[in-house]
Amino acid sequence: MVLHATYVSPLCLYFVILSAVGQDVVNVAIGKTYKQINKHPLQGPSSNAANNNTSGVYEGNNCIHTVYDQSDTNHWWEVDLGRTYPVQDITVWARFNFVGNFNNRLYPFTITVDNQTCVSVTSAPSTRSLSVRCTSVMYGQVVRLTLKKTSQSLNLCEFQIFECDAGRWGDRCEYYRCGRYCAIGKCDKKTGKCSACTPGWYGEQCNKACQSHSCLLHTCHQTTGRCLKCYAGYDGHTCTECEDGFSKHNSNTCSPCSAYCKDRNCHGDTGNCMQGCVDGRHGATCNTTCSPAGCQTCHQHSGQCTACRPLYNLDPNSQCKECADGFYRKTANAVHCTECSGRCHNNTPCNKATGDCDRCPPGWEGQRCFKGKWFYFLFYQHFQLNSNRVC
């Protein structure tokens, strides 16, 4: 049953709430900070209205009493809970031994939670206590009771705010415990929603398992189930996809792309290199060496040479067997090219098969122009000396 803006069967409501919540609730108004509009000179501290004593005997300092002043209207008392609580079930207690109607200094009243109306009661019950409920669960810290009467003091002997005991939750605390995988076993006392889940679980009550063992530390978003972080090499909502640079080629696990893939970029499922191969490699995964040895780059799929290493020329058959100008093979089976002597006439290239010069410059002879002509040097020096003389 719910009290809105009018009074509804207080005695019946009181017993319904107490029988439903029973011993599975705690009074969170105890031991907090309290204030009121003013104090009667004979009244004790404001905490008298929340000291867990419901006897209602004013002389024992078990109640609070404000002083009527024509300048004051709507007298109030409040409790600061110290932090935000879910507030819904509240019980108030009037005085026991007041002469006449003991309820006329408590009713009608309004209860607010952080200045938002929780419930209003417009007429007094026939009993000394009344249990009320906010129209819905209200989350707040400061709970205030205000007497809605202009010419009256406020007497309040006990103010109780009930919350489900540890491990219980629900509208009537009917659920025995929070979700099994709630972190440190705590959940919202009204909704059962866990504030956090233990690793490997998600959902409002942490009753859903994270979908992949590739989630780092098996942790996922409490609402969506998305992995918060994946292990190295994994990506995606549930870390079942491979991140860039990894693939599931021939395996159910994400492994690094071939080191011969350009930019380490390969298809996540097949492992095929997406941007081609590094120099000297070809094939779908770039694991085959270009041939012959002088080939620097080759077509990824056909393996046909497209460029040669330095010292080699690419011949019409896409081979790198011919040496570049200025180089030759020492033997027919030599793999590497050797530089020409550099003595050929006018620096023309030597023969690429033999290393011989077609012609030597003046003063040199031999197949590779390594031999000097001694008589040529003598004549040349004599000519130079005589040419420098002044006639």
Image (spheres, rainbow, N blue to C red):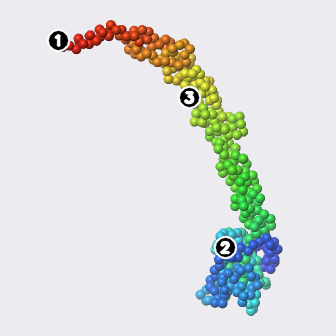
Instruction: Compute the Cα span from label 3 to label 2.
Output: 72 Å
Quadrant assignment, res 172: bottom right
Q: What element carries label 1?
A: loop
Q: Is residue 318 found left or right of 130 in the rendered image?
A: left
Q: Is mark 3 on a helix, strand or loop?
A: loop
Q: Is residue 71 found left or right of 92 in the rendered image?
A: left
Instruction: Compute the Cα span from label 3 to label 1.
Output: 67 Å
Q: Which amino acid does label 1 sit on?
A: Cys
Q: Which of marks 3 and 1 is nearer the N terminus?
A: 3
Mark 2 or mark 1, whichever is nearer to me: 1
* Residue position for label 3: 279
Q: Which residue is drawn at 64% across and 88% down?
A: 40
Question: CB atoms at circles 2 and 1 under 8 Å apart?
Answer: no
Q: Which of marks 2 and 1 is nearer the N terminus?
A: 2
Residue 293 location (% of width, % of height) = 57, 21
Residue 123 visible from this viewpoint: no
Extreme residue toward the bottom, this view: 99
Residue 106 location (% of width, % of height) = 71, 84
Residue 190 location (% of width, % of height) = 74, 66
* Residue position for label 2: 81
Are there few (<14), some (14-19), or many (20+) residues within 10 Å of tag 2? some
Q: Which residue is drawn at 64% across and 38% down?
A: 256
Q: Is mark 2 on a helix, strand or loop?
A: strand
Q: Point out the image quarter for the C terminus.
A: top left
Query: What's the mark number on residue 391?
Result: 1
Q: What residue type is labelled 3?
A: Asp
Quadrant assignment, res 116: bottom right
Q: Which residue is drawn at 62% across and 39% down?
A: 245
Residue 197 visible from this viewpoint: yes
Extreme residue toward the left, this view: 391
